[in-house]
Amino acid sequence: MTPTLFADLGLLIILLGLALLITAARPAFIAVAAYMAYGLVMALAWVRLAAVDVALTEAAIGSGLTGLLLLGAVAWSQRHTQFQARRLGLRPGIPRRAGAGRGLTLLVALACGGVSAGLAWVVLTLPEPAPSQVPLVQAALPITGLGNPVTGVLLVFRAIDTLLESVVLVFALVGVWSLASDPAWGGRPRSLHVVQHSGALVLLGQLLPPVGILMGLYLFWVGADAPGGAFQGGTMLAAMWLLVLSAGLAEVPAVASRRLRLLITGGPLLFLAVGFSGWAFAAGFLGYPPAWSKPLILAIEAALTLSIAAALAMLVAGPPERPTAADPQPDPQPERNQQRGHR
Amino acid sequence: MSVLDLYSYLLIGLGVLFFCTGTLGLLRFPDALSRLHALAKADNLALGLVVLGLLPQASWPLGAMKLLAVWLFALLASTTVGQLVGEAIRRGDPFR
């Protein structure tokens, strides 16, 4: 057995063990911790498969950001169940698990098993050599002016997929924001500054962002010719923003902020605008004029990076919960206010 | 095997030893603060030894500087996380 095969086998065993832990762990916190570790090991597996772009995305979004969102959900559901228990006069603490019934569990297990078996069958019955679009992409890549075939696929050959992905992110954020109660609408999300007076966190919040922002911008910039891109760079920027917010060095913006909304929708809007102008100046929707393809792709990627960063950070921040005094609210009853003033 | 290769094997082996020690402490120490101590101290030293061992194998100067940066950022992150978890334990948050 060669050393690399030995290492790969170790990776596979760790992955399967972590997957088992995710499904078997009773406390949701343990399951989420295992899920984040799973994402990191999965990223290593992608590196072993020479898919560095996927590895970066898996580590940044799959493990880091999704893990953070799930941790937030666990914390929220624990607060919620404790609140419910107090309201109903039950003993405080986590109540007995009111999980799914045996039938539903069996159904989920069957569905998951079916998908796994189907995937295994497809992979095992692939013809040798497996069908591949790689030669087509390699042949067409020079006209795009890009050096990274993954970016070529994501922003040129299958640009529609990336466009829809970036729009889905905005819709997800709209979904989260719509969970706000009426009085809090337009206000700020719950403060991320939960650990007060932590000198260590403040120090990290001051030391790391300059390096992290540079790294995020580098990931976006290098994406044209090497592994990287808008999603990886954007996640890095979002992480830096979240770090500054949780260190209490800045305040979460109100969701009614026009600048924030422009930042979040800017990337998808520019992508759409360039896409539609393809009817006029190129072969069709999402086509680029050949001489302009590289600058246009870089502009779209830059706007997408900022939009993804803002959207991801606001997804973690959650729905607005605090009405802001700073933003003047439209007064619903100006007449009564005037009367009160005269009195 | 050149002297540099021998140096790498020696330092990486020492690093692995420290990783094992840290993990042993994480698994065997009685309370959260001591476990945190084992993790933060031994693992950072272990990572540093592995990085120092890899330095002669890396391309000079960029590859070597990236390796050193990885160590520095891991130090920074684990120090901060160690402080935060320690503070949470002192406040009595459930981190057991």
Image: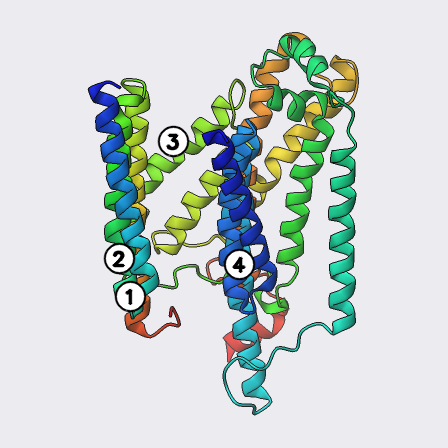
Q: Name the residue that disc number 3 marks.
A: A214
Q: A242 above or below A287?
A: below
Q: A10 above or below A274?
A: below
The amino acid pointed to by label 3 is Leu
Q: Name the residue that disc number 4 marks.
A: A32
Q: Of A46 and A225, which appears nearest the observer?
A: A46
Place of residue B47 in the rendered image (x, y in percent of width and height, measured from the top left): 29, 41
Residue pictured at 53% horizontal, 73% vertical: A78
Q: A301 above or below B91?
A: above
The amino acid pointed to by label 1 is Phe
Query: In the picture provided, is B43 more to the left or to the right than A57?
Result: left
User: Dot 3: what SS?
Assistant: helix
Q: Of B28 and A185, which appears nearest the observer?
A: B28
Camera sees residue A322: no
Q: Name the residue that disc number 1 marks.
A: B29
Task: Provide the chain ID for the residue under circle 1.
Answer: B
Residue pictured at 22% horizontal, 21% vertical: B4
The amino acid pointed to by label 4 is Val
Query: In the picture provided, is B52 more to the left or to the right than A116?
Result: left
**Contact flag, marks 1 and 2 (Cβ < 8 Å):** yes
Task: Provide the chain ID for the residue under circle 2.
Answer: B
Could you confirm whether marks 1 and 3 are on the same chain? Answer: no
Place of residue A138 in the rendered image (x, y in percent of width and height, measured from the top left): 66, 12
Q: Of A197 and A85, which appears nearest the observer?
A: A85
Q: Name the residue that disc number 2 marks.
A: B38
Q: Which residue occupies the extreme bottom position in the image? A: A89
User: Dot 2: what SS?
Assistant: helix
Label 2 CA crowd tier, 10 Å (few <14, some 14–19, many 20+): many
Query: Which of the two discs, 3 and 4, labels the residue nearer the N terminus?
Result: 4
Colour convention of the picture: rainbow
